[in-house]
Amino acid sequence: MQSPHVASHPTIRILLAIILFTYTAQNMLNVSVAPLARALSLPEWSVGAAVSAAALTVAYLSQFWGRRSVAWGPRRVILLALCCAFIASVLFSTAVWQRSIGALGLIFTTIAIILARGPFFGAAVAAIPPTGQALIAQLTTTQDERVRGMASFSGAINLSIMVGSVVSSCLGLWFIEAPVYAAPWFISVALVIAWVGLPRDNSANAKRSFLPRARIFQNRHDNSTSIQLSSHTYERLTPENSPKEASETIRSLPPRVKWHDQRVFPWILSAFGIFFTVGVMQITIGFVLQDRLSLAPHEALSWTAIMLLSHAAGAMSMQLIAVPRLGWSPSVLVRYGMTLGFLALLVLTVASSLWFLIPAMFSLGVASGLVGPGFTAGGSLSVSQNEQGGVAGVLNATSAVTWIFAPVCATALYSWLPLAPFFMALCVLSVSLSVAWTHPRLRTKVQPL
């Protein structure tokens, strides 16, 4: 990261290593799932259903983990998440193996893959981004530092996607099921790194450092509530606002941030389209390559990995190299990124040659590499410091929500009409593009509250 203070934090360095191995495993599953569905004679909709179920879990648990990563500490949250991811990847690979040898029927294989890649794996990946974003928010104070920190964090995720694509392509050339069997090993490495490298959390101290424990006293003379904190400070609350605030303090958790919060909602609307588009493309590109280029499943696996690799390369080049040096505000990053993403999607809709498909996927990656840091930094800068855990969960859940609908809708529509998912993505992207350029809040320079 560009900020020395953020880069020197040992928890951040360990977290980035965990991200590398965890998201490499996730991408290995993503690259393999479409070709495997054809090879194992699984219905196409099962691919979308598995990813959508995972996204639903991420959307539901993101703020839960985001707030608890501050209250409990990162070690406990990350270890729980990685244990869940390891179990999920083992179940997924076992189901694939049983199906390949004919020991498991179509229905049971479909159910097992949806459950393993869906709620089990989704519960794991729901914890990591909000934990990292909340840490970066605590370690940065200015808009420029926040943008660079979020860009570096997102860049680490895209680096893992590139690694996962390369590893999947190499393993897939040898054996189409090999990436699935390798995924649990990558997660086990992440688990060891977390166990050894993350500092032990003192939950009591962590709670007191963020929101002290409190005892409530009722003053009978003026009907007000006094809260005595463990640090011997006092806060006077009126009867109107005491129940809610006292409840939050007693739980020792950061405040909850709502989706429709007017400080954050414009950022959500402006970036929703690019996340939706990426979800549609990543889940359908394996089918697109097989149908438009007449590729066999084992050939499509390698080219699918290359397409995802080009997308990740575009995003990573922006997040790790360009964004930290451009010095653009979050709103400018979002506006330019959304515009480029719309143009890239137009090309992907009609292209039938690798000479156009690969550059278009790279451009879509560049677009998401601009929008992602602007979106997370803009939303983070719009709320106060003690709301960073909550807003990190909301921002992470935003992209997850798009993955609830995008994969299952895209695969279902693709089975009906191959161009239908692209038209759907263009409509959604147009709405977000309009918000990015016209909403007044995205024209105002944001600073930390």
Image (spheres, rainbow, N blue to C red):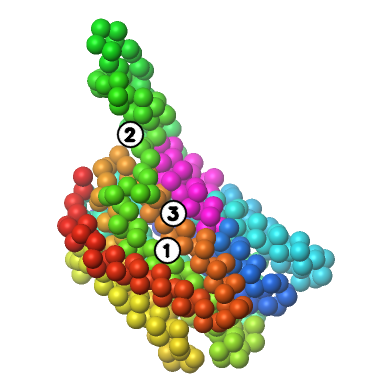
Q: Amino acid at mark 2?
A: Phe
Residue 94 horizontal side relative to residue 251, left or right: right
Discs 1/3, front: 3
Name the residue carrying label 2: 210
Q: Amino acid at mark 3?
A: Ala
Magenta highlight on residue 64: yes
Q: Position of residue 398 (x, y in %)?
A: 41, 57
Q: Amino acid at mark 1?
A: Ile
Residue 47 in view of the camera: yes
Q: Which quadrant of the rendered structure holds the N terminus?
A: bottom left
Magenta portion: prevailing SS class: helix
Magenta range is 54-81
Q: Residue 337 falls in which quadrant of the image?
A: bottom left
At mark 2, the secondary structure is helix
Residue 122 horizontal side relative to residue 425, left or right: right
Pick the residue in front: 386 or 350: 350
Name the residue carrying label 1: 157
Name the residue at 60% across, 72% down. Answer: 412
Label drawn at residue 397: 3
Which circle's residue, 1 or 3, is located before the other in the chain?
1
Pick the residue in front: 191 or 274: 274
Name the residue at 74% across, 67% down. Answer: 97
Name the residue at 33% across, 13% down. Answer: 217
The residue furthest right is 103
The residue furthest left is 445
